[in-house]
Amino acid sequence: MIARCLAGALLGFPLAAALLALALYWLPNHGQALLVPALILFFPLWTALMAGAYQFRSGRRAWLLLGLANAVAFLALWAGRQPGP
């Protein structure tokens, strides 16, 4: 039980940040007008990810799948970078 709790809290935080960053990235003008609503949405998204961690059968599976989701989200952010000037 504690493993799922820690997985949701520790891996849910960066996953929520990465998902919101991806959502803002794909909006026109990179979602600058929606930055404050996205920041307000961050906490409920993180809470939902923490609660969703309890749906896994084991703590090991929660760590594995949330870690994989983090890797995919941050890889997508890295792949979407604009080249420098």
Image (cartoon, rainbow, N blue to C red):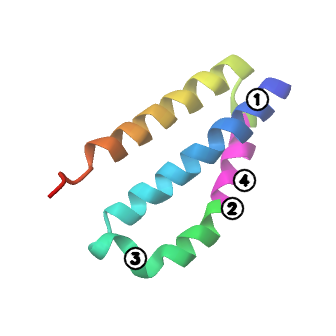
From the image, tell me which residue sits under label 1.
4
Badge 4 density bin: few <14, some 14–19, many ≥20, Cα 10 Å? some
Which residue appears at 42% of the width and 40% of the height? 74
Question: CA–CA distance between discs 3 and 1?
Answer: 34 Å
The x and y percentages for residue 16 are 57, 51
From the image, tell me which residue sits under label 4.
47
From the image, tell me which residue sits under label 3.
32
From the image, tell me which residue sits under label 2.
44
Which segment did they paint magenta?
43-53
Which residue appears at 38% of the width and 73% of the height? 31
Q: Earlier in the sequence, mark 3 or mark 4?
A: 3
Q: Earlier in the sequence, mark 2 or mark 3?
A: 3
Main secondary structure type of the part rendered in magenta: helix
Residue 5 in view in this figure: yes
Q: Earlier in the sequence, mark 4 or mark 1?
A: 1
The x and y percentages for residue 64 are 58, 22
Question: CA–CA distance between discs 3 and 4?
Answer: 24 Å
Q: Is residue 44 left or right of residue 65?
A: right
